[in-house]
Image (spheres, rainbow, N blue to C red):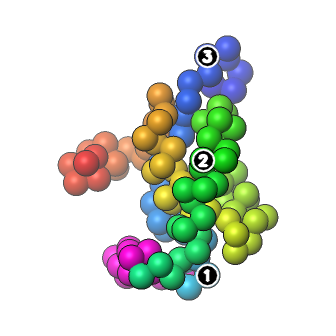
């Protein structure tokens, strides 16, 4: 897409395992990571998740105006440190306004994930 004139608003989706930047939660895996992430978010203990909405609102056009990959998102988060948005929730926010969505194949075949 980067080499074409077609420029859709695009994003990708990845799992928490691939995109978590919280120093404690990213060390976990599988269901334990999902549960801990949800717990931290509902109790407002994850600053990265809290930073996501303002970051998206401020950078919406640049985020959706180019094709980004997981490495780009993780690099941005690493550069911003504790003020970084959560790449996991950021991609989900971006997906609500994207024209084109890249997902792992397993997301397509799993009915629960498609919802």
The verdict on residue 33 being magenta is yes
Q: Is residue 33 visible?
A: no
Q: Position of residue 67 (x, y in %)?
A: 63, 36
* SS of the residue under disc 2: helix
Q: CA distance from mark 3 to mark 1?
A: 38 Å
**Main secondary-structure element of the magenta-colored stretch:** helix
Image mark for residue 6: 3
Mark 1 → mark 2, Cα distance in angstroms: 25 Å
Q: Residue at x 22, y 54 (%)?
A: 112
What residue did someone put label 1 on?
23
Instruction: Write down the quadrant of residue 79 in the picture.
Output: bottom right
Which region is colored magenta? Answer: 27-42
Position of residue 32 in the picture relative to residue 12 (left or right) = left
Residue 92 screen position, x and y as percent? 45, 51
Say whether residue 5 is left or right of residue 90.
right
- To which residue does mark 2 refer? 57
- From the viewer's side, name the closer residue of 88 and 3: 88
Q: CA distance from mark 2 to mark 3?
A: 24 Å
Quadrant in which the N terminus is drawn = top right
Residue shown at the point (62%, 22%) measured from the top left: 7
């Amino acid at each position: 897409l980067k080499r074409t004139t077609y420029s859709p608003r695009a994003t990708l989706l990845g799992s928490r395992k691939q995109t978590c930047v919280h120093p404690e939660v990213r060390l976990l895996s599988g269901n334990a990571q999902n549960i801990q992430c949800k717990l931290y978010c509902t109790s407002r203990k994850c600053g990265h998740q809290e930073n996501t909405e303002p970051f998206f609102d401020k950078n919406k056009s640049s985020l959706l105006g180019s094709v980004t990959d997981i490495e780009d998102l993780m690099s941005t988060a690493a550069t911003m440190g504790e003020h970084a948005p959560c790449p996991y929730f950021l991609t989900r926010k971006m997906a609500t306004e994207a024209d084109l969505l890249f997902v792992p194949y397993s997301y397509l075949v799993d009915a629960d994930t498609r919802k």
